[in-house]
Image (cartoon, rainbow, N blue to C red):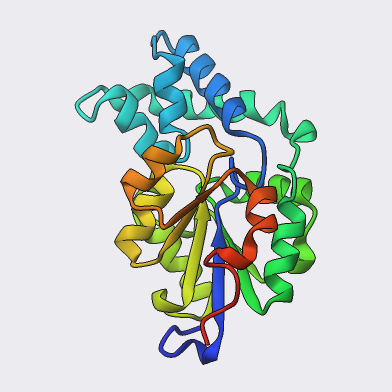
Amino acid sequence: MGTEDGGGRGAVLFDVDGTLVDSTYLHTVTWWEAFRQAGRTVPMADVHRAVGMGSDHLLDHLLGEDRDRGGDAAVSAAHRTLYAEYWPRLAPLEGAAELLRECARRGWTVVLASSAEAEELAVMRKAVGADDAVADATSSDDVEGSKPAPDLVRQSLERAGVPAGRAVFVGDTVWDVEACGRAGVPCVGVLSGGVSEAELRGAGAAQVFRGPRDLLEHIDDSLLAAPPA
Protein backbone atom coordinates (compact mmCIF):
# COMPACT_ATOMS: atom_id res chain seq x y z
CA MET A 1 0.00 0.00 0.00
CA GLY A 2 1.50 3.38 -0.95
CA THR A 3 1.61 6.60 1.03
CA GLU A 4 1.43 9.15 -1.75
CA ASP A 5 -1.88 10.78 -0.80
CA GLY A 6 -3.35 8.63 1.95
CA GLY A 7 -6.71 8.50 0.24
CA GLY A 8 -8.04 11.22 2.55
CA ARG A 9 -7.65 8.97 5.60
CA GLY A 10 -5.65 9.33 8.78
CA ALA A 11 -3.84 6.74 10.87
CA VAL A 12 -3.12 6.46 14.57
CA LEU A 13 -0.13 4.26 15.33
CA PHE A 14 0.12 2.65 18.77
CA ASP A 15 3.09 1.30 20.61
CA VAL A 16 2.00 -1.73 22.67
CA ASP A 17 4.36 -2.52 25.58
CA GLY A 18 3.70 0.05 28.30
CA THR A 19 1.17 1.90 26.14
CA LEU A 20 -1.62 -0.66 25.79
CA VAL A 21 -0.25 -3.54 27.91
CA ASP A 22 1.06 -3.21 31.48
CA SER A 23 4.38 -4.89 30.77
CA THR A 24 7.19 -2.35 31.15
CA TYR A 25 8.31 -3.45 34.60
CA LEU A 26 8.08 -7.12 33.63
CA HIS A 27 10.58 -6.36 30.88
CA THR A 28 12.73 -4.48 33.37
CA VAL A 29 12.93 -7.40 35.78
CA THR A 30 13.47 -10.04 33.10
CA TRP A 31 16.20 -8.08 31.30
CA TRP A 32 17.87 -7.47 34.69
CA GLU A 33 17.76 -11.19 35.44
CA ALA A 34 19.04 -12.08 31.96
CA PHE A 35 22.03 -9.78 32.48
CA ARG A 36 22.62 -11.27 35.95
CA GLN A 37 22.64 -14.79 34.51
CA ALA A 38 25.28 -13.66 32.01
CA GLY A 39 27.44 -12.26 34.80
CA ARG A 40 26.54 -8.65 34.04
CA THR A 41 25.46 -6.19 36.73
CA VAL A 42 23.14 -3.56 35.26
CA PRO A 43 21.13 -1.34 37.64
CA MET A 44 17.42 -1.94 37.30
CA ALA A 45 16.79 1.80 36.94
CA ASP A 46 19.02 1.86 33.86
CA VAL A 47 17.26 -1.18 32.43
CA HIS A 48 13.86 0.48 32.91
CA ARG A 49 14.92 3.56 31.00
CA ALA A 50 16.10 1.42 28.09
CA VAL A 51 12.88 -0.59 27.80
CA GLY A 52 11.10 0.34 24.60
CA MET A 53 14.19 -0.03 22.46
CA GLY A 54 14.57 -3.10 20.36
CA SER A 55 16.96 -5.64 21.88
CA ASP A 56 19.72 -4.67 19.45
CA HIS A 57 19.73 -1.04 20.59
CA LEU A 58 19.05 -1.95 24.23
CA LEU A 59 22.18 -4.09 24.50
CA ASP A 60 24.31 -1.39 22.89
CA HIS A 61 22.80 1.24 25.18
CA LEU A 62 23.32 -0.72 28.40
CA LEU A 63 26.50 -2.69 27.70
CA GLY A 64 28.35 -0.36 25.33
CA GLU A 65 28.97 -0.67 21.62
CA ASP A 66 32.62 -1.72 22.07
CA ARG A 67 31.79 -4.86 24.10
CA ASP A 68 32.40 -8.47 23.17
CA ARG A 69 29.13 -9.34 21.43
CA GLY A 70 29.65 -13.09 21.71
CA GLY A 71 27.12 -13.39 24.52
CA ASP A 72 24.42 -11.13 23.09
CA ALA A 73 22.28 -13.93 21.65
CA ALA A 74 22.30 -15.78 24.97
CA VAL A 75 21.25 -12.66 26.90
CA SER A 76 18.41 -11.93 24.47
CA ALA A 77 17.29 -15.56 24.56
CA ALA A 78 17.32 -15.55 28.37
CA HIS A 79 15.20 -12.40 28.46
CA ARG A 80 12.73 -13.88 26.00
CA THR A 81 12.43 -17.10 28.02
CA LEU A 82 12.00 -15.27 31.32
CA TYR A 83 9.50 -12.80 29.90
CA ALA A 84 7.50 -15.56 28.17
CA GLU A 85 6.67 -16.96 31.61
CA TYR A 86 4.43 -13.92 32.07
CA TRP A 87 2.65 -14.20 28.72
CA PRO A 88 -0.42 -16.00 30.12
CA ARG A 89 -0.81 -13.24 32.73
CA LEU A 90 -0.28 -10.13 30.60
CA ALA A 91 -2.97 -7.55 31.25
CA PRO A 92 -4.09 -4.54 29.23
CA LEU A 93 -3.87 -1.10 30.75
CA GLU A 94 -7.21 0.35 31.76
CA GLY A 95 -9.05 1.77 28.77
CA ALA A 96 -6.70 0.28 26.15
CA ALA A 97 -9.29 -1.70 24.19
CA GLU A 98 -11.87 1.07 24.44
CA LEU A 99 -9.34 3.62 23.17
CA LEU A 100 -8.53 1.54 20.09
CA ARG A 101 -12.22 1.05 19.33
CA GLU A 102 -13.00 4.73 19.80
CA CYS A 103 -10.22 5.71 17.41
CA ALA A 104 -11.57 3.28 14.81
CA ARG A 105 -15.10 4.60 15.37
CA ARG A 106 -13.89 8.13 14.67
CA GLY A 107 -12.49 7.04 11.32
CA TRP A 108 -8.83 6.49 12.15
CA THR A 109 -6.94 3.56 10.65
CA VAL A 110 -5.46 1.89 13.73
CA VAL A 111 -2.03 0.24 13.36
CA LEU A 112 0.09 -1.30 16.11
CA ALA A 113 3.82 -0.52 15.97
CA SER A 114 5.81 -2.64 18.41
CA SER A 115 9.51 -3.37 18.91
CA ALA A 116 8.48 -6.85 20.06
CA GLU A 117 8.91 -9.92 17.89
CA ALA A 118 5.85 -11.11 16.00
CA GLU A 119 5.05 -13.99 18.39
CA GLU A 120 5.20 -11.72 21.43
CA LEU A 121 3.11 -9.08 19.68
CA ALA A 122 0.45 -11.71 18.99
CA VAL A 123 0.29 -12.51 22.72
CA MET A 124 -0.12 -8.83 23.58
CA ARG A 125 -2.84 -8.36 20.97
CA LYS A 126 -4.74 -11.20 22.57
CA ALA A 127 -4.31 -9.58 26.00
CA VAL A 128 -5.68 -6.25 24.75
CA GLY A 129 -8.61 -7.98 23.05
CA ALA A 130 -9.47 -5.31 20.51
CA ASP A 131 -8.35 -6.81 17.20
CA ASP A 132 -11.70 -5.81 15.73
CA ALA A 133 -10.42 -2.20 15.81
CA VAL A 134 -6.90 -2.92 14.50
CA ALA A 135 -6.29 -2.63 10.76
CA ASP A 136 -2.69 -3.86 10.77
CA ALA A 137 0.43 -4.28 12.90
CA THR A 138 4.21 -4.15 12.60
CA SER A 139 6.81 -5.86 14.76
CA SER A 140 10.60 -5.93 14.93
CA ASP A 141 10.46 -8.87 12.50
CA ASP A 142 9.23 -6.49 9.78
CA VAL A 143 12.12 -3.98 9.87
CA GLU A 144 15.90 -3.81 9.96
CA GLY A 145 16.14 -1.23 12.76
CA SER A 146 13.98 -1.07 15.88
CA LYS A 147 13.15 2.01 17.97
CA PRO A 148 14.57 4.61 18.34
CA ALA A 149 15.27 4.13 14.61
CA PRO A 150 12.29 5.35 12.55
CA ASP A 151 11.87 2.09 10.61
CA LEU A 152 8.86 0.79 12.59
CA VAL A 153 7.04 4.09 12.29
CA ARG A 154 7.69 4.30 8.57
CA GLN A 155 6.64 0.70 8.01
CA SER A 156 3.45 1.35 9.96
CA LEU A 157 2.71 4.33 7.71
CA GLU A 158 3.14 2.02 4.72
CA ARG A 159 0.77 -0.51 6.26
CA ALA A 160 -1.80 2.22 6.91
CA GLY A 161 -1.35 3.73 3.45
CA VAL A 162 -0.93 7.29 4.73
CA PRO A 163 1.88 9.86 4.69
CA ALA A 164 3.47 11.10 7.92
CA GLY A 165 1.41 14.27 7.84
CA ARG A 166 -1.81 12.27 8.23
CA ALA A 167 -0.70 10.18 11.20
CA VAL A 168 -0.32 10.39 14.98
CA PHE A 169 1.68 8.02 17.17
CA VAL A 170 0.88 7.07 20.78
CA GLY A 171 3.74 5.77 22.93
CA ASP A 172 5.17 5.67 26.44
CA THR A 173 8.95 6.04 26.02
CA VAL A 174 11.42 8.63 24.81
CA TRP A 175 12.43 6.03 22.20
CA ASP A 176 8.92 6.16 20.74
CA VAL A 177 9.09 9.94 20.63
CA GLU A 178 12.54 9.95 19.04
CA ALA A 179 11.51 7.42 16.39
CA CYS A 180 8.48 9.56 15.56
CA GLY A 181 10.60 12.68 15.31
CA ARG A 182 12.86 11.00 12.78
CA ALA A 183 9.82 9.86 10.79
CA GLY A 184 8.05 13.23 10.94
CA VAL A 185 5.04 11.94 12.91
CA PRO A 186 3.71 13.78 16.00
CA CYS A 187 3.74 11.67 19.16
CA VAL A 188 1.23 11.66 22.01
CA GLY A 189 2.90 10.37 25.16
CA VAL A 190 1.41 8.34 27.99
CA LEU A 191 2.87 7.92 31.48
CA SER A 192 1.85 4.27 31.86
CA GLY A 193 5.38 3.01 31.16
CA GLY A 194 6.86 4.93 34.08
CA VAL A 195 8.60 7.69 32.08
CA SER A 196 7.96 11.21 33.34
CA GLU A 197 6.03 13.89 31.49
CA ALA A 198 9.12 16.11 31.52
CA GLU A 199 11.19 13.43 29.78
CA LEU A 200 8.54 12.74 27.16
CA ARG A 201 8.03 16.43 26.42
CA GLY A 202 11.78 16.99 26.42
CA ALA A 203 12.09 14.31 23.72
CA GLY A 204 9.44 16.10 21.66
CA ALA A 205 6.05 14.66 22.65
CA ALA A 206 3.25 16.95 21.48
CA GLN A 207 0.89 15.99 24.33
CA VAL A 208 1.08 13.77 27.40
CA PHE A 209 -1.69 11.85 29.19
CA ARG A 210 -1.64 9.56 32.22
CA GLY A 211 -2.53 6.44 30.23
CA PRO A 212 -5.06 4.98 27.78
CA ARG A 213 -8.04 5.72 30.03
CA ASP A 214 -7.02 9.35 30.52
CA LEU A 215 -6.42 9.77 26.79
CA LEU A 216 -9.81 8.24 26.03
CA GLU A 217 -11.57 10.53 28.51
CA HIS A 218 -9.88 13.59 26.99
CA ILE A 219 -9.78 12.43 23.38
CA ASP A 220 -11.66 15.50 22.15
CA ASP A 221 -8.83 17.67 23.48
CA SER A 222 -6.12 15.49 21.94
CA LEU A 223 -4.59 14.96 18.52
CA LEU A 224 -6.82 11.90 18.24
CA ALA A 225 -10.04 13.93 18.24
CA ALA A 226 -10.54 13.33 14.51
CA PRO A 227 -8.49 12.24 11.49
CA PRO A 228 -7.09 15.07 9.37
CA ALA A 229 -9.75 16.60 7.11
**Relative depth, front residue between 79 and 25:** 25
Image check: 179 left or right of 99?
left
- Residue 150 in sight from this viewpoint: yes
Q: Position of residue 53 (x, y in %)?
A: 42, 40
Q: Position of residue 134 (x, y in %)?
A: 69, 66
Residue displayed at 53% across by 90% down: 8
Q: Position of residue 20 (x, y in %)?
A: 65, 47
Residue displayed at 58% across by 68% down: 224
Q: Tell me the quarter of the picture where residue 222 sits.
A: bottom right
Q: Tell me the quarter of the picture where residue 191 sits.
A: top right
**Relative depth, front residue between 149 and 24:** 24
Residue displayed at 49% across by 67% down: 168
**Relative depth, front residue between 63 and 23:** 23
- Residue 78 in sight from this viewpoint: no
Residue furthest toward the left? 66
Q: Position of residue 198 (x, y in %)?
A: 38, 39
Image check: 61 left or right of 224?
left
Image check: 198 left or right of 100?
left
